[in-house]
Image: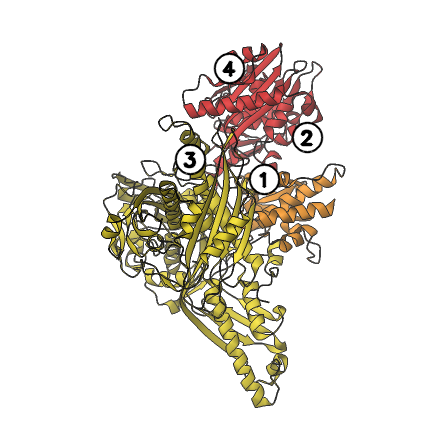
Amino acid sequence: MRISVQINGRTYAGDVEPRTLLSDFIRHQAGLTGTHVGCEHGVCGACTVQLDGEPIRACLMLAVQANGRALTTVEGLAGPGGELTALQRAFTEHHALQCGFCTSGFLMTADALMRRRQLDPAAPPLTEAEVRAELAGNLCRCTGYEGIVSAVLEALGTAS
Amino acid sequence: MKPAPFDYAPATSLHEALTLLTREDARPLAGGQSLVPMLNFRLARPALLVDLNPVEELARLEVAPDGSLRIGAMARQASLLHSVQVAAGWPLLADAVMHVGHAATRSRGTVGGSVAHADPKAELPVALAALDARFHVRSRERGSRTLRAAEFSSGPFTTALREDELLVEIEVPAPHAGARMAFAEHARTHGDFAVAGAAVVLAPGDHAAIALLGAAAVPVRVEAAERAARDGAAAPEVARLAAAGIDDAYRRALLTTLTERALRRVLAP
Amino acid sequence: MIGAPLRRREDARILRGETRYLDDIERPEMAHAAFVRSPFAHASIESISVPESAEGLVAVFTAAELGDAVRPFPVMEPAGTEVATSEAHPVLAAGEVRYVGQPVALVIARSRALAEDAAELVEVEYDPRPVITSARASERCLMRWESRAGDVEAAFAQAAHVVSGSYALPRLVAAPMETRGCIASHDAGSDLLTVWCSAQDTHRPLEQLAHILRRPESAIRVIVPDVGGAFGSKGVVAPEVAAVAAAAVRLDVAVKWTEDRLENLLAASQGRGIEGDLELALDADGRMLALRARLWSDLGGYLLTTTPIPPRTAATLIAGCYDIGVADVTVVGAQTHKVPIGPYRGAGRPDAAYMLEALVDEAARQTGIDRVELRRRNLIRTFPHTTPTGLQYDSGDFERCLDLALQLAAANPDEDAACARGTGVALYVERAGGAFESAEIELLSGGRFAIASSSSPHGQGHDITFAQIAADRLGVPVELIELRFGDSATTPAGVGTFGSRSVAMAGSAVAVACDELVERARALAAEVGLGAEPAVNWTALAQAADAPLRAEATFRSANVFSSGAYAATVSIDRATGALTVEHLAAVDDAGILINPLLVHGQVVGGAVQALGECLSEEAVHDEDGQMRSGSFLEYGLLTAADIPPIVTGEVQTPSPLNPLGAKGAGEGGAVGALPAVANAVTDALGGVYVAPPFTAEKLWRALHDEAAGPR
């Protein structure tokens, strides 16, 4: 089946089988390998991308289901010249990544969270416990989460 | 793990979905958060996957004129969290769904999908059982039928749905006046499936519902406990009655505690 | 530069999604591998029949097809250790299988999905055999090490107190977020086999593949791309990698194997899996006179290269931080029908600390001496110190670590009817460094430097850390230094990234190479009439030199010993048994720290792995040897919402064994947090010992055990 998917504002077309996972389409047919595959059963969150701005597990969606839809992946976060966003800079500042394999998933989750919060500027700031709960759908085996939580708290604070 | 091969057909209407489901070895694809892992593990090997996602009429979430909540089977789990009406009338659903997976699974996972998957550790079937939900089911050959929660869930990962039948809508009756609701669970790690849980609805003197997760392979309503709660018995006594039928000492203690915690929240001023 | 918390240069490309992990790499005409795996824990293979054809099928290999082209894994035989090298893991199963998931056939096809389809068509006839899952019950010993020092019988005979305990740690999976994998490609013309491998270093895959494939190392090139974590599980090449490499030599296409998560949980080497019976003899003042330890390691069905190491390490470290002169230690690696054991963060060090520190707390209970005071009376205070098991601790200040941990620990919790509260303290010592590593440095035009290191990173931050070391030695800004890792064709010889050794060994090699370069620079400066004081003018020298100025160094040393003290506060909900770790204080002595920001990350990361071990992680095998924790739905990794407050502190006692004074920081968190939390749980249970993971059900039953009475 021929599908056409918009990723980070660009259109990618390709032939897929019904069973081709969206994660594999993004990585091997669109060639965007910043999205990673950690489990293929929706638990680790490494494959998290955004569909119409909402975080989803790319490993749990069939590529055919993304036909005609718009996705954002980690490659779509930085500016046109590669300028890192405040969130990305906060990750470096707080040593929120070690091996980096889970990082793109966390960025997509946190970015979606930030944009959702921006829609409701009157809402009280999230507590650390609430941020941790929002990030609990992304697993990290290296960092113990400390730097990631600090980075997201900072980025949320800066954004508001 | 890559799935075994299958055919794929997107349904554009409920009628088309029901027709496609009459094919041999066809399965509906709802949010995919439970089914796709099984496809990836090659534990599920349908010949045809019928994609329900394009069927907009299945995704409605609204309050009917009779005050009941109508949850289309394809309503996303996240919609229960964002709905002002759900928060007002059936906060138990929002409470329960917060424990279901994470934002990235709730964005795609559906209410109907969770219920039809019937995982004994899932939160939504238990919350819906406590709310006396009714399940509207349809097939092309036999038309519509309606099942009560106890009729719908029949065993671990088993429902009364027949091969060609689709869960179309979940109807949750209007809440009793003055009813308060709470959900409590114990999970191993944050967002993990529940080891045990309790959903409580209480309008003192009028109505009580207590549904347990983890007491059996399906949600369990305990009448004796519900009567006691309705009649104003204290939380510890109600909780003791709720879990009394459980053999294993630990599971009984856990469910007693969780029921009591949910009750205390409901009874708190 | 040394001691500066510089941010990592490595991060920008990771944050932009510009990394190249193994599965991101595509080679022209690449085929894909899947494996037929044993569904039985123990069986003989009666027959294998492969499909004549299947869609996209390229080839099927079994042990019969590979024949003499391959031989089983090399197995390490550490000093004084009996190792049943005949039980080395074969590449593909030859006639029998000894664990569920053992690779039996390799199927190569045009895509991974097609390879999995074809694998389902391979028919294997098995004849099941009896399954052994308990180390103590096993009659087959694959590894054994013993150590006796002093008159143990006399010490126990004259002891005022004899304390004993039996302890167990279940198996764990390493579960790095990136699974294992490789791409193998053989060039017929040059007979060069190139293997891209998600590995901890180039050296061990190179050495192991050379042995297994019966090829000279010069005919193999190992390239390690970006690696998404390892924690010990990517040290030895996977048997699957060896099979794919062997197949690639026969085929004219590159072959990729990307392990999926189910394979990873099933068939990657597992960690821990040890039981111990320990006895401690003390005098009336609580001075430790002698220690007896008998350890059983649940080793698995075969030996992989480093399978004998973790149990032996546990045995050698069993006296920990205490001045015990007399000891009788035996460790037996028992054969069980499970996937083999391998190093997993800590690799025997947490095992030793866990058992010893639990025993010391038991001694405190029995003697009535305060558990901190009891420790103080027995701490090693002078260095170097030789243990009764033959290790030489080079440096440390155990008491200072203990004092600092107590200072950082949460205040003693109030009594609470709803919760059983407990506190625990534990010391640890860990063997780090050792063997050798190398570095090569070259002065480039413009006064920039290129360093090739024998070590490779999997998230530790080698790039910025080694750049800091070099910048310090050369007297130049960090920005001028580039590091290169991970290609056996272009990086120098070494041993590997494991065992908390990279700064002490590879970092020291960088330092020594830089010092050598400075020497040569000074000499050249004198020759060409450039001044070299106060600092070398590198830019001018680069221009003036006829040939690029270079230096290299191989740095070798004995092991260095890191140590630390951890203190934990826990509460157990009496009604549900749920454990909450309220607070963790972590003090580590890793010698001189190059980059404290990165060290902190290692400590917290390791501590959280230990918390996982305490709260929810366990590789569960049933009595038929079937893995019951075979996906992330069952194997409970901790999330961001499960982490308690962790406060860290450092003690920096320099090691005299390397120019940096460095020890190792990679594993301390995983080593120290486990015994501290375990001791806190035992304290909360009023002295009742429960093996980890401390699930709510276990703790509830311990609190409500009718036989023991209420607590």
The amino acid pointed to by label 1 is: Val
Which chain is displayed in orange in the rendered image? A
Q: CA distance from mark 2 to mark 3?
A: 46 Å
Q: Is residue C216 above or below residue B253?
A: below
Chain of the residue displaying label 3 = C
- The kind of secondary structure element at disc 4 is loop
Per the image, the residue denoted by label 2 is: B82
Q: Quadrant of residue C99?
A: top left
Of labels 2 and 3, the one closer to you: 3
Q: Position of residue C411 (x, y in %)?
A: 55, 42
Q: Is residue C97 above or below residue B172?
A: below
Q: Position of residue C341 (x, y in %)?
A: 36, 49
For marks 4 and 2, the one nearer the N-term is 2
Of labels 4 and 2, the one closer to you: 4
Residue density around tag 3, few if under 14, some if 14–19, many if 20 or more, within 10 Å? some
Per the image, the residue denoted by label 1 is: A64
Q: Is residue B182 above or below residue C647?
A: above
Chain of the residue displaying label 1 = A
For the residue pair B227 and C92, the one nearer the viewer reads as B227
Per the image, the residue denoted by label 3 is: C686
- Mark number for residue B222? 4
Which chain is displayed in red in the rendered image? B
